[in-house]
Amino acid sequence: MKDYVIELEKPDFEVRTDLAVEERESFPGDGGEIAGVSLREWHEEDSCVKMTEVKILDEQGARAMRKPKGTYLTLEADQLAKKDEDFHEEVAAELSRHIRRLMEGLLGAKAKTPAEYKILAVGLGNSQVTPDSLGPEVVGNLQVTRHLEGQYGAGFLKGRNLPSLSGIVPGVMAQTGMETAEILRGIIKETKPDILIAIDALAARSIRRLGTTIQLTDTGIHPGSGVGNHRHGLTRESLGIPVLSIGVPTVVGAAAIVQDTISALIQVLSKHASTQGMGQYVEDLDPDEQYLLIRELLEPEFGSLFVTPPNIDETIVQLSFTISEGIHKAIFA
């Protein structure tokens, strides 16, 4: 039998996912045994919505999960990918409850009634690239109110029990030549919001989560991190105010798709005497090593290739309305 020896370097790399729930799934067991990380899963009553709450409690958990300390809420439902207005309305109502809870947690002692909040909504991404246009689409659907104070005088919003909501789509560096964090720091200095809500398209590890998963976090956001395009983070530390982020995975790396079929590949290799050694070698690799091997084979030929569903246009339209309605329900008392 021929021996197969492949030397793999162990460089610093991350399997590209923005979802904490997928990081948790990469560990053996049910993911509840990770030191410094707590896990809670539940299904909403009379609903197809599955909720997962991952809390990273300390620095040990942050290192294991490769994400900052904080709360990561994931809402999953296959029906999100379908055009079902009643179901999307149900999801928006559920989303609003978690948005309000995270906002209250972030503001702490400063927590107010929703109508007293000064909120800046930020639509991250490139509106000209459909899989990256979720943030701009959501902000475009929002009913902004901050300008009404200027038009009708101080006290107009308070008298009508309305929050002060403003929105901005800062674009991407290739369009503006500026980091998003630089743009937002200037806006925050002038408008002085209590909290920032950032909406962004994410990258997933599993293709089944595209357009069917919504993640909320109280840790801020790192634009482009899921596709290896690291930018300055939008966090309380970098912006000076709390940041609540809402994201939906719209792309998955080609290497991750190949990894999803790795078991089938191993079975085929193991059936033939000439390739049994290779099949056993791949099977013995841990998931990160499998991903690295696949990526090293694919990227020299195809580059960093990302894949999005064929119905992404319709998905973005549906989800942008669902998320904007969730934000409306959370802040318009």
Image (tube, helix red, strand yellow):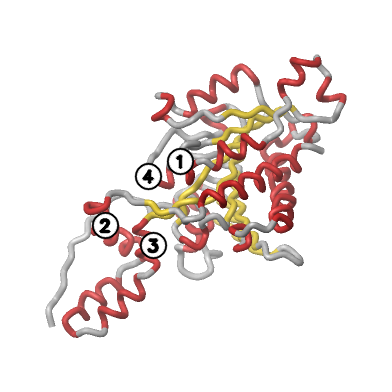
Is the residue marked by circle 4 packed among few (<14), some (14-19), or many (20+) residues within 10 Å? some
Is disc 1 placed on a helix, strand or loop? loop
Q: Nearer the viewer, mark 1 or mark 4?
A: 1
Q: First in sequence: mark 1 or mark 4?
A: 1
Q: Position of residue 283 (x, y in %)?
A: 31, 74
Q: First in sequence: mark 4 or mark 2?
A: 4
Q: First in sequence: mark 3 or mark 1?
A: 1
- Amino acid type, label 1: Val
- Amino acid type, label 3: Ile
Residue 52 seen from this side: no
Q: Position of residue 53 (x, y in %)?
A: 62, 56
Distance, label 1 to label 4, CA atoms, is: 17 Å
Q: First in sequence: mark 3 or mark 2?
A: 3
97 vs 60, left or right, is right
Distance, label 3 to label 1, CA atoms, is: 21 Å
Which residue is identified by label 4? 228
